[in-house]
Image (cartoon, rainbow, N blue to C red):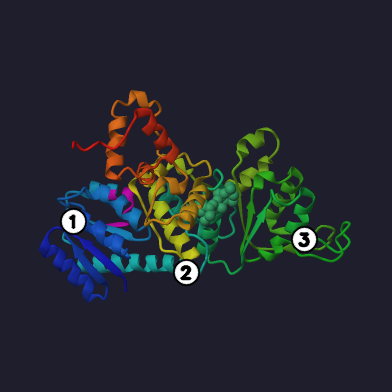
Amino acid sequence: MGSCIVVEDHPGQRKLLVATLDAEGHDTVGVAGGLEALRAVREAPPDVILLDLGLPDSDGLELIPQLLAVAPLTRIVVITGQDDVPTAVSALRAGARHYLVKPCDREELLLVVAREVRVVHVEQARALHDEGPVFWGTTPRIHRIRMQLSRIADSPHTPVLILGKTGVGKEVVARELHRLSGLPGPFVPVNCAAVPDELLESELFGHEGGAFTGATERKRGLAELADGGTLFLDEIGDMSVALQAKLLRFLHDQRFFRVGGEVEITVRCRVVAATNRDLEIMLQAGDFREDLYYRLAVLTLEIPSLKDRVEDIVPLAYHLLRDIATEIGKDPRQLSHAAEEALARHHWPGNVRELRNRLERALILGSDNTIQPSDLDLYVNPPRSPDRVGNEPDRLRRILEEEAWIVARAARRLGVPRHWLRYRIKKYGLAPRQEPV
Ligand SMILES: Nc1ncnc2c1ncn2[C@@H]1O[C@H](COP(=O)(O)OP(=O)(O)OP(=O)(O)O)[C@@H](O)[C@H]1O
Ligand SMILES: [Mg+2]
């Protein structure tokens, strides 16, 4: 059974919900408001949060992303009045998984909670068994992709094309699709850009002994190894047009010849291709075969860049922090408010990979309990022209006072490099106030 937090301001209803879930074996805590909920979740993220949307101290819709930011794997079920179903729908958009209308039907409540607990446990188990990261996100576009993935998983022989900029998680998605498909065979990745063109065909389809200089014995290709599983063709945009034709044939009838071979080989596997290149432009330039494109593009998943899902950045950061902390055997750390702001403002050309790298560095190198922008190598943009910001000297003086004029501490709090602050101290002639004698 799972752990639950019930967030409900009405004492009678809260007691009833807690008692109902407790009786079912869930380890349940009741809290009366949003702030208390955030505190409780920070202390121990539960499997499920039952959230009343009509709280007096916080807006339920704003609370959802805040809760998920602290506990990304937790599932939120909202409870709403009968006349407020549209708000419940907005709550689903904000990241809640399900809604129940008051008064809650006992059976439905228990069913929904049990199901959500099960899902959370599966995701936790995956993380424990090192099956690779879960494709994670809270925004509607990511929800949609996850839903598409479960549908595509049911037709395990249709090729899939995954598009998206570098580091957005294309391989994570491909692996997750493989997992969801429950295929008996392995997941076999091939990086088409990393293997020289002359060798790629034999890597993929294998060769017979003596097929070319250096091919002394028969070698099975990666497509054969992927039998019953998934063949992941990463960077498909880098495959030569000649090899594209052979791949197309394989996609049509699951058959191919080894290089230099005369016997046709049949392999049943799902082909998932990915690229960060613009295939449509490549089509026009004749660098990508149209027929292959249309064969692959039957099922296309477009993974959005991080800057196009800003709401995901901070929750994703917390999710990754936990992951990395477990990996390197350190305690996860909190992000300071300034760090969260800096993360949300950065452009993320390297997408989730860049986010992960910055967080890993912060966890390894940082010493404080809280991660600051400087630990992430991100600086809260200093105002472009300090002259235009009339109160900058006052603001800096106040913070320096509060930090006992220790420049390192004040800089850390401001999320700026020390030299930036020192320069301004000098420029504005800032100094500790002299106490009157
Ligand atoms: N949604 C996500 N949830 C958790 N981790 C993610 C997510 N997306 C990406 N990552 C992490 O980001 C890194 C990059 O992901 P991945 O290798 O799948 O990107 P990619 O799109 O294949 O990039 P490239 O085009 O450069 O090959 C990996 O460390 C991966 O674990
Ligand atoms: Mg990749």
Above-or-below relation of 273 to 387: below
> Residue 29 in the image: x percent, y percent?
22, 67
Q: Quadrant of residue 270?
A: bottom right
The residue lying at 74 percent from left, 51 percent from top is 246
Quadrant for the N terminus, please: bottom left
- Magenta range is 91-99
Point out residue 378 in the picture as x, y percentages from the top left corner: 45, 43
Q: Amino acid at mark 2?
A: Leu
Q: Which residue is mark 1?
A: 33
Left/right placement of residue 227 relative to residue 408 reads right
Q: Residues within 10 Å of mark 2 (few under 14, many from 20)?
A: few
Quadrant of the rendered image containing residue 222:
bottom right
Q: Which residue has dot 3 on it?
A: 206
Marks 3/2 in contact by CB < 8 Å: the verdict is: no
The question of residue 97 being in magenta is answered with yes
Which residue is the site of mark 2?
128
Q: Is residue 264 left or right of residue 7?
A: right
Q: Going from the N terminus, do you reach mark 2 or mark 1 first?
A: 1
Q: What's the distance in space between the residues labelled 2 and 1, CA to CA?
A: 33 Å
Location of residue 174 in the rendering, given as x and y in whole percent from the top left corner:
55, 56
